[in-house]
Every structure is written in structure tokens, then in C-alpha cells.
């Protein structure tokens, strides 16, 4: 077994310790083949987005003549953005506001309630805990399409048709969120820490707020990001209960295709405007996302 760097520094000297540290670092450093493979995968992942930008920067005549556009963007992107934003059939600003409202509220709600339920299932002992958790997980096997009719009946009864509340309420908590936070808190939150807080006089809510919630931050960040993306791209249920008068962004993009002569440059511009906020979100919160996935996947 190789000695640690501090042991080498004490027995041989600091220079030998620095040489050994550089040697171990170079041994762990990925080679050029790894970077080449990652570069290929990165370019392959970015090409669909770039292809969308190429179509969004062209005009309808150019797209009709060139099924595969040139890799050099055309100069019509800003004019296409202006046409999409000023489209009489689609209120993109209203769609953006609706999508942002739904995504933010559902993300915050899912993170809070899923963490609360996950803490209860992972660290509290009560009768029927495993059976109730099994019932929650079993609902993940039910296709979303089967719930459309009863949800529409409920929305009609409460007169929620055409209102974003009909989209927000069904997404306030998810079975996957409860399952994910239960698994994470079961391994990441020591029971001894909770018992120490209770001995110090913390109430149940105070223990959750001060102990469980900070410990769940990496997994909660991941859950919030995925919930935001799922809400942002959700099309089926909003298209049924909201319709074209109060659309979200996916519905607005679909409305750009309803004319008899489809302008693919405007359609691709709408798709790009819908996708860019998610790309920015991934860039900003990418490190937290990877941290949450890795910490949730590793036990102990």
C-alpha cells in the first residue's frame, strides 16, 4: 500500500512529497482519448440546438430550397424574433409569464413537500409507514394519460378551465419527489443528529427546518431543477385545460404551426426562445445538479 503524502513529507522530505503528489495527480488525470470522446459527445449534443438556430436565422424561401442548411447562420434571426414576438395569433409574453409562474410554484412546492414527506418516511417511525410509501411509489406506474379525464372533471367542477391554477395544483407534489428525498435522507442524514437535536429541545418542525432541510440541499436542488424542466416543457395537460387563449410556451410554439403555410423559420425561432432559458438554467445550476446526483447515488 502506498504511503500518504503527509507521511512521505515527514519521512523523506517535502520535495519528495511534492514529486509524489504530482505523480499521483498525473496518473489520475484523463488522457487525450477521454477528452476527444467527450468533445465528440458534446458537439453531438449541441448540434440539434445549433441546427435550430440555423433554421431560425434563415427565411422560409431559403429553407424551402435547402433541406440541410449551411453551417454558417443567415442574417434573419433578429427579424424572426420580432415576428414571433409580434405574432397576432400567439401572445408569447403571456405564454412566458404562465410557464414561469407554473414552473417556479410547482418546483418550490415539490421540493418542500417532497422533502417533508421524505424526512417523515426516512427518519420517523409510525404505523403503516412502509405500506403508505409503497402506495405512493405505485402511483408512478400509472400513465399520466389515464388521469387526464378525472382531472378535467375536477377542474370543470371547480371552474378552473383556462386558469393556470388547474395546472399548478396537480403538480404541487410528485411521487418521484417523495421517493427520491426518502432515499436520499435515509442515507445522508444520521439518525443520531436528529436525536441530539431532540435532546436539545428542538421541536419536530424545528428539527426538520434546521437539520433535515440543510442536509437535503444537494438532492433538493436536483429535484427542483428537474421539476422546473418538467413543468416548463409540459404540453399535454396545459393544452387540454388552458387551450390557446391562455397558453404556456409549448402551446404557443404549437400555435405557430397552425397556419396553412407553415413558416419553419418562425417555428424554429419559437423553439429556440423556449429552449434558451433551460440552457441558461443548466449552465448556472449545473454544478449543483451534478452534486445532487452524485450524493444521491452514493450511500453513506
Image (cartoon, rainbow, N blue to C red):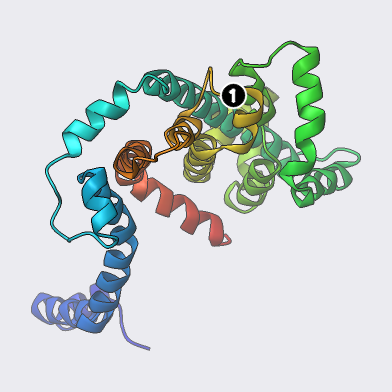
Q: Which residue is mark 1?
A: 243
Does residue 202 appear in the picture of this structure? no
Identify the residue shown where x is 47% and y is 31%: 255
Q: Secondary structure at mark 1?
A: loop
Position of residue 21 relative to residue 195, above or below, is below
Position of residue 276 relative to residue 50, above or below, is above
Query: Horizontal and vertical percent for residue 196?
Result: 63, 36
Hey, which quadrant is residue 266 in on the image?
top left
Identify the residue shown where x is 18% and y is 32%: 79
Q: Nearer the viewer, residue 1 or 77?
A: 77
Q: Nearer the viewer, residue 213 or 87?
A: 87
Q: Nearer the viewer, residue 25 or 152?
A: 152
Does residue 125 appear in the picture of this structure? yes
Identify the residue shown where x is 69% and y is 25%: 204
Position of residue 1 relative to residue 259, above or below, is below
Q: Is residue 288 left or right of residue 58?
A: right
Q: Is the C terminus in the top left, top right, bottom left or bottom right quadrant?
A: bottom right
Hey, which quadrant is residue 83 in on the image?
top left
Q: Is residue 276 left or right of residue 165?
A: left
Query: Horizontal and vertical percent for residue 280?
Result: 30, 40
Q: Is the N terminus in the top left, top right, bottom left or bottom right quadrant?
A: bottom left
Identify the residue shown where x is 66% and y is 21%: 166
Query: Horizontal and vertical percent for residue 37?
Result: 29, 77
Q: Is residue 26 left or right of residue 108?
A: left
Which class describes the residues within 10 Å of circle 1: few (<14), some (14-19), or many (20+)?
some
Q: Is residue 195 left or right of residue 138?
A: left
Residue farthest to the right, as pictured: 127
Residue farthest to the bottom, as pictured: 1
Query: Horizontal and vertical percent for residue 143?
Result: 75, 48
Amino acid at each position: 500500500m502506498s504511503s500518504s503524502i503527509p507521511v512521505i513529507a515527514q519521512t523523506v522530505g517535502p520535495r519528495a512529497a511534492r514529486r509524489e503528489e504530482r505523480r499521483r495527480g498525473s496518473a489520475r488525470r484523463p488522457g487525450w482519448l477521454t477528452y476527444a470522446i467527450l468533445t465528440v459527445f458534446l458537439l453531438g449534443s449541441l448540434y440539434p440546438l445549433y441546427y435550430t438556430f440555423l433554421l431560425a436565422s434563415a427565411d422560409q424561401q431559403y429553407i424551402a430550397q435547402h433541406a440541410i442548411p449551411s453551417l454558417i447562420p443567415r442574417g434573419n434571426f433578429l427579424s424572426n424574433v420580432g415576428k414571433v414576438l409580434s405574432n397576432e395569433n400567439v401572445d408569447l409574453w403571456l405564454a412566458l409569464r404562465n410557464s414561469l409562474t407554473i414552473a417556479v410554484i410547482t418546483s418550490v412546492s415539490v421540493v418542500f413537500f417532497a422533502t417533508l414527506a421524505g424526512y417523515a418516511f426516512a427518519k420517523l417511525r409510525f404505523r403503516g409507514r412502509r405500506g403508505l410509501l409503497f402506495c405512493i411509489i405505485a402511483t408512478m406506474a400509472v400513465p399520466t394519460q389515464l388521469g387526464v379525464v378525472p382531472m378535467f372533471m375536477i377542474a370543470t367542477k371547480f371552474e378552473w378551465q383556462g386558469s393556470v391554477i388547474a395546472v399548478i395544483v396537480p403538480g404541487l407534489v410528485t411521487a418521484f419527489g417523495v421517493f427520491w428525498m426518502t432515499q436520499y435522507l435515509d442515507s445522508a442524514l444520521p439518525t443520531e443528529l436528529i436525536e441530539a437535536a431532540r435532546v436539545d429541545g428542538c421541536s419536530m418542525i424545528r428539527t426538520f427546518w434546521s437539520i433535515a432541510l440543510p442536509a437535503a440541499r444537494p438532492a433538493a436542488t436536483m429535484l427542483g431543477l428537474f421539476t422546473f424542466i418538467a413543468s416548463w416543457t409540459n404540453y399535454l395537460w396545459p393544452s387540454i385545460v388552458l387551450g390557446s387563449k391562455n397558453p404556456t410556451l409549448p402551446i404557443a410554439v404549437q400555435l405557430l404551426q397552425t397556419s396553412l403555410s407553415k413558416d419553419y423559420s418562425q417555428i424554429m425561432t419559437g423553439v429556440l426562445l423556449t429552449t434558451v432559458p433551460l440552457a441558461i438554467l443548466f449552465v448556472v445550476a449545473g454544478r449543483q445538479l451534478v452534486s445532487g446526483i452524485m450524493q444521491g447515488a452514493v450511500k453513506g
